[in-house]
Amino acid sequence: MNERALQSNGSLVSRLPQLMMALILLQPVLDILSFWQDQAGADNTLTLALRFGMLLVVALAGFCLSGRKRIYVALAFVLLGFGLCHAAAVIQVDLQTLPGEREATGFWMLLSDFANYVRVAQIPVFTLCFITFLKRSGEKGFAAIERSFLLVLLIVAAVEVVSVLTGTNPYTYPNKSLGILGWFYFANSQSAILSMIVPVAIMAAIRKGTSRWIQPLCICVLGFAVLYCFGTRLSFAAIGATGVGLAFTLFVTNRKQKGAIAMLLVCTAVCVGTVFQSPMYENQSRVAENAVRKQAYIDTLVAGDEAWARDYGLTGEALERQRLVGAYHFYLGGLVEKYGISRVIDLYDGTTDVSELANVRAAKRSYCELMLEDSPLLSRLFGLELGDMRYRTWNYDVENDFYGIYVLCGLVGLGLLSAFFLYFFLLIVKALLRNAKKYYTSEAGAWGVALVMAMLHAFATAGILRRPNASFYLSVVLAVIYYLVKLRRYEETKTQAGKFPAGTYRKDASQ
C-alpha cells in the first residue's frame, strides 16, 4: 500500500503544473457560467457546488502531498472549532428572535450562513494547498501559475470584446451604462481579480520578452486597457500601482530594462492623461450630479417637516428631531423601522448632509453597528448570521470585507484572519530586511502589487474575502509570495560585477 501510494503521489507531483493551470483557468469559466445562470434567473447552486467540490478535491490533494500533515490537521481543528462556536452564537440569537420581528431565521438561513463561512475558510485552505503544490513542483509550478494568470487576462479580454460586439455587456455600472464588465457576475470581485492578474501578467511578459518586444507591449497595452475600461476607482488605482510599481521594481532590479520602464510609464501617463474621458470619471461626475439632486430633496423634506412641526407648536429638541423624520425615513427606512427614529438620529448626529444621509455604504455599516450593540457577547466574539443583515426588503450586508468579517465572524474571526494575512506581510518585511537585493526581484515586485491591490479591495469593497472567485486568486498570490520568500533557492554565487543574476535559482534538494 505504501509503495502504491508513493507511486500515486509521484504521478500527481509530475502533473502538478498542469493541474494548477487547470484550476486557475477554470475560474473565469465558472464566473461566466455564474453570469449566465443569473441572466437566466437561476440561482447559483450549481457553480457554488462546483466550487465547494473543487475545494474538497484540492484540500485532499494538498494533504496527500504534504510532508507536514500536522499543519493541515491543525488548520482543520481551528476551522472546525471556530465554526462550532459561530454556529452556537447564531443559534443563540435565532432562539431569541420572535417571528413578528420579521428576521431571517430557519434552516435555509443557517445553510446560507454555512456557505458564507466556507467562502471565508477556503482562503487559508487554498493558500496552504498551493504552498504544498509549489513546494513539490518548484519552478515549473511557479512558471505554470504565471502563464495561467496571463491566459486568464487573455480570456477576460476576449470575453469583454465579445460581450461588447454582441451587445451583451452588462456594464460595470448598469444603471448608467458605463464600464466594460463582460460576462462576469459581480463587478467588485472582477475589479479585484483584474487588479491581481494584470501586474503579474505584464511582468511575466516583460521578463520573457527581452528579444521580442511586440508581445510584452501588447500585453502591457491590453492590461492597462482592461483596467481603464472597467471603470471603477480601484481599477484606476490599479493602473497607477501597476505602472509605477512595476517601473520602480525594474529600475531597482534591472536598470537595463529601460524600454520596459518607459513602456510602463507611458501607458500609465496615457491613462492618467485621458482620465476625463474614462468611464470612471464619467461615473463619478454623475454621482456628484445625483448628490446635488438628493441634497435638494433632503432640504425640501426637512423644510416641510420643520414647517409642520412649528405649526404644531413644537420647539427645542422636539422640533429638531421632528424636522428630520421625513428625510430619515426616506433614506434610512430600514434602520428607522427597526431601531427607532431617535436612536438613528443620535447615531447620525442629526445630520442632513447628503454625503452621510444618502450614503448606502454608511447606512449598511450603521445598521450593523446598531445590530452588534444589541447582540449578546457570544455573537460579538464569533459573529452574527448572514441572514441577520437582511431586514424586510432591505439588504444591509456591508460593503467592506474586513468589517463584514467582524460582523459575521466576530472579534475572534477577524483576529484569526488578520493574523493570517499579517504573517505573510511579516514574511515580506523580514526577507527585505535580511537581504533586499536577493528577495526584491521583478517577480516579487509584481506579486507584491497584486497583494496590495487585493488588500485595498478588501478594505474598500465586499468583493474579495467572501467571494470565492476573487479569494481564490488571493490565495494563489499569498502562496506564491510564500514560495518566493521561503521556498525558492536563489543562486548564492555572484557575477563578476558583484550583482545577483536576475531570475537565477537552484532547486531545493529536498524536492
Image (spheres, rainbow, N blue to C red):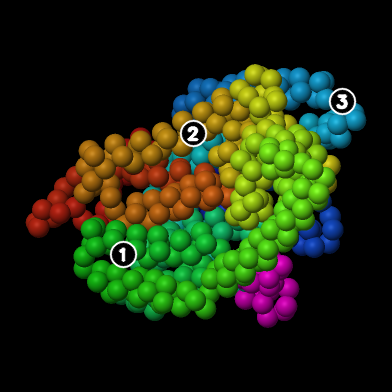
In which quadrant of the rendered image does the N terminus lie? top right
**Magenta segment boundaries in residue numbering:** 161-183
Above or below for 25 versus 387: below
| Quadrant of the image containing the C terminus | top left
Question: Closer to the camera, 133 or 109?
Answer: 109
Magenta run includes residue 278: no
Residue type marked 3: Leu
**Residue position for label 1:** 247
| Residue 172 placement, left or right of 3 | right
Left or right: 450 as drawn, with respect to 405? left
Q: Mark 2 points at which residue?
A: 418
Q: How many labels does the image show?
A: 3
Q: Which residue lies furthest to the right in this view?
A: 100
Earlier in the chain: of badge 2 and badge 3, it is 3
Query: Residue at point 29% right, 69% down?
Result: 261
| Depicted 9 relative to depicted 143: above or below | above
